[in-house]
Image (cartoon, rainbow, N blue to C red):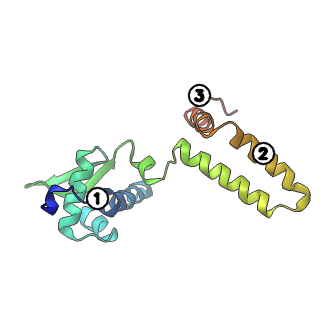
């Protein structure tokens, strides 16, 4: 069997996501021009790989590019609506739920013996509702469906 018939290599984790992370950081900094070549280099990509990665990110709506003739990405104008979430800059409800559980576990482990029970009860309450319910509640809080004050 021809190796090319098996499937294609992953480009999200090895190429596109690292470049999107650098791009979101650059856009979020609010400083200067966001040059594709410099961003690709900062992500450890050569010029041609960076070009292909930016075009892929554009096709998926993750970046808005300014291009030269011949479809050559020059600058990133902006990032798409999901870019912050995909890169972890805006965590999704599942990530926040995991962080909450991890922090409660850490707090319990670090607490003086007299306080460990409080953290254990909080942890049992949070995990006792089930992960799906916890993620839904966190999502509702993030999106404002649950008033926060």
If you read the primary sequence from the N terminus, does the residue marked by circle 1 or circle 3 appear first? 1
Q: Which quadrant does the C terminus fall into?
A: top right
Q: Where is residue 87 drawn, in percent x and y?
A: 43, 54
If you read the primary sequence from the N terminus, does the residue marked by circle 3 or circle 2 appear first? 2
Residue labelled with disc 2: 122
Residue 110 lies in what quarter of the image?
Answer: bottom right
Residue labelled with disc 1: 10
- Residue at the farthest right position: 114
**Direction from residue 75 to residue 131 in the image, left or right:** right
Kindly identify the residue that appears in the image at 24 percent across and 58 percent down: 53
Q: Alpha-carbon neighbours of circle 3 within 10 Å: few (<14), some, or many (≥20)?
A: few
Q: Nearer the viewer, residue 46 or 97?
A: 97
User: In 3D space, how far apart are the residues under numbered discs 1 and 2 (Cα atoms)?
Assistant: 40 Å
Q: Where is residue 126 drawn, in percent x and y?
A: 71, 42
Q: Where is residue 33 drawn, in percent x and y?
A: 31, 60
Residue labelled with disc 3: 145
Q: Secondary structure at mark 3?
A: loop
- Residue at the farthest front position: 1
**Direction from residue 122 to residue 46 in the image, left or right:** left
Residue 128 lies in what quarter of the image?
Answer: top right
Q: Nearer the viewer, residue 100 or 45?
A: 100
């Amino acid at each position: 069997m021809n190796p090319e018939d098996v499937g294609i290599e992953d480009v999200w984790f090895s190429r596109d996501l690292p470049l999107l992370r650098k791009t979101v950081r650059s856009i979020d900094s609010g400083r200067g021009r966001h040059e594709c070549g410099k961003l690709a280099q900062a992500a450890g990509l050569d010029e041609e790989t960076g070009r292909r990665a930016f075009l892929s990110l554009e096709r998926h709506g993750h970046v808005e590019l300014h291009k030269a003739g011949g479809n050559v990405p020059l600058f990133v104008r902006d990032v798409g609506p999901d870019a912050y979430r995909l890169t972890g800059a805006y965590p999704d409800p599942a990530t926040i739920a995991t962080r909450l559980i991890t922090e409660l576990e850490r707090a319990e482990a670090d607490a003086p013996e007299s306080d460990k029970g409080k953290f254990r009860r909080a942890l049992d309450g949070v995990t006792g509702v089930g992960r799906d319910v916890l993620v839904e509640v966190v999502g509702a809080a993030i999106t404002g469906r649950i008033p926060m004050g």
